[in-house]
Image (cartoon, rainbow, N blue to C red):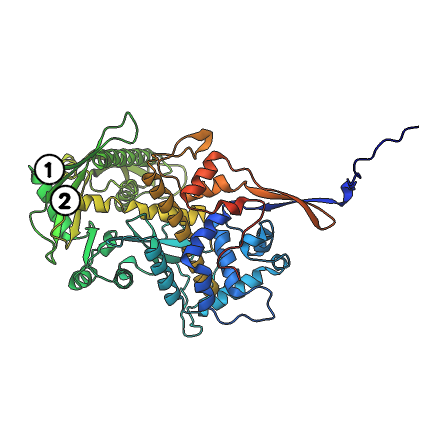
Amino acid sequence: MRKRKVVGEDRRILLSPADIEVGTERIAGLPVVNTVLDRLGFDNLVAACLPEPDPRRQIEPARAIGLLVRNLALGRRPLYGLGEWAGSFDLGLLGLNAAVPETLSDDCVGRALDQLFLADRASLLTALSLRAITTYDIALDELHDDSTSLTLYGAYGEARGEPRGGIIPAHPARGFSKDHRPDLKQLVWVLTISADGAVPITYRLLDGSTEDSTTHIETWERCRALAGTSNFMYVADSKLATHDNMAHIAGQHGRFLTILPRTRSEDKAGRAWLAKGPVPWAEISRTPGKRKADPPEVYWAVPAPSCSAEGYRIVWMRSSSKRIHDAATRFEQIGRASTALEALTESLSSSRCHLKERVAVEDAAKAAIAGAGATRWVRFEVKDEVHYVHRQERRGRPSPNTRYRRLEQHSFSLSWSTDAEAVTYDAASDGCFPMVTCDTEMSDAELLAVYKRQPRLERRHATLKGVLEACPIELKSAYRIDAFGFCLYVALLIHALIERELRQAMADAGISELPVYHEHRPCKAPTAARVLELLDPLARTTVSHRGQVLTVAAPTLSPLQEQILTLLRVDLSAYGPIPSQPVNST
């Protein structure tokens, strides 16, 4: 019988399904965050600032701070879940080994925050800000400043602002809550951003009872140190408009722009001037409405007839949309006051009404009008109808000799009207607001353009509280909270730099919009939160047999994901089958 010729030996190995392990390592937007931190040299800056690590610790404090910042930027997890979060990622991208995530507890991160509090955070913040300014070429000719409140849960009875290592932490206290939670203690967060990309350049974490007007001088001095000059435009809200604040900036040859508060006499005099009319308004800006059916947004300007009490330039602005809003608000407040007075009138007609004195009725009417915010426009009058009734002096059946006493009873009613003269007076200044500045060269249109960039700072605060979930802060130690504020600032800086670089790259490439929204809807200004959300599903799959890796499946990048990563100048090899180490990993 003829034998079959054997060409080669069959070397296939049969594997038991029970011995095969499939693992998933998340990549998500971590390479994007790492790219920003590597350009800033963040890990090296923190390591140089903190003391030498204890060799008994498996994870250095600087590495724990770096992991916390990355966690905040990608999606905040509780401190006790930081180890689990790190274990779900490709550890090479975090610069960790397989054993470290198990030891990454909340106590480990807490001790790292303690060391960060005792470190020279002022120098660290300055070095980081200067690195961002120089690396990304951020212009500092226009800076915007504002504050918000960070709420806390708990009494914080032990947080008395006692120093540790010569450093006094921010003291949790009750103050003016911008979150409308006066029942909670808070800290005041002061943030300064550049007009160029709305990039945070410095921050301050202050006591919860800090008054905003007292923060500007020190903040301006920090900005001057970063800018290397005092000739930048410093923009803030009406809390800047105090004699000391404006005199300090102008005295150092700086420039400022703010809104005069209604409490200033210049505001009252200006509105009286507007009510007399006519006023030579000049149109300085016209933009299309936000929706197709909306009218255009128009701004007019006119110089005030006199300067401020300190001698600074005042320019009155009038907005078409604010003019409509002010009139509608006044009409609504008058309507609410009328409704409240009608309810009070109905109550007065009841026999069970507890208001028996004229003074009590007047106080109730004033409170009803004040509650509606219409005290200036609604006038009322209390009418008192007196009638008499006779009652027996003693109880019993009446007789011809029964004595009676005459009792005086009051029946109150209300009448009210709208003060047409006050409404006409206020309508003349609807949509108007006075801006004060020490700059004498910028035109009215340029001043308006500068101030209209102030809402970008509000969006940074929205990112801080919404995307980064800064509130409520659930740390117990005031020292750790103070250090945690620095980590929040770095995470906010990462988001701002991602957005700035992506939008600049889009402009350089002639790309007007990217389909980053759901159903591929276009977006002209993609946010970092949306970019990181698009990259979040990306993960690497590893198939192994008894500890030996058989194959690694890299994630498949969609055209949009690849385009975004290319615009951000992120190395695509981080999403390949072989992970890459971050530059600053040790």
Kindly indicate the quadrant of the structure image that contains residue 348: top left
Residue 418, compared with residue 125, is above or below; it is: above
Residue hosting label 2: 444
Q: What x and y, as percent, mark residue 560? A: 46, 35
Residue type, label 2: Asp
Element type where label 2 sits in the image: helix
Q: What x and y, as percent, mark residue 555? A: 56, 40
User: Mark 1: few, some, or many residues within 10 Å (few <14, many ≥20)?
Assistant: some
- Quarter of the figure that contains the N terminus: top right
Q: Is residue 349 left or right of residue 430?
A: right
Task: Depth check: give the residue in front, 122 or 132.
Answer: 132
Q: Residue at x 49, y 44 (%)?
A: 572
Residue extending farthest to the bottom is 166
User: Mark 2: few, some, or many residues within 10 Å (few <14, many ≥20)?
Assistant: many
Residue 299, compared with residue 144, is above or below; it is: above
Residue type, label 1: Ala
Q: What x and y, as percent, mark residue 151? A: 43, 54
Q: CA distance from mark 1 to mark 2?
A: 10 Å
Residue hosting label 1: 282
Element type where label 1 sits in the image: strand
Task: Depth check: give the residue in front, 244 or 160.
Answer: 244
Q: Is residue 190 left or right of residue 544?
A: left
Q: Residue at x 45, y 51 (%)?
A: 35
Residue extending farthest to the right is 1
C-beta proximity under 8 Å, tags 1 and 2: yes
Task: Depth check: give the residue in front, 20 or 106.
Answer: 20
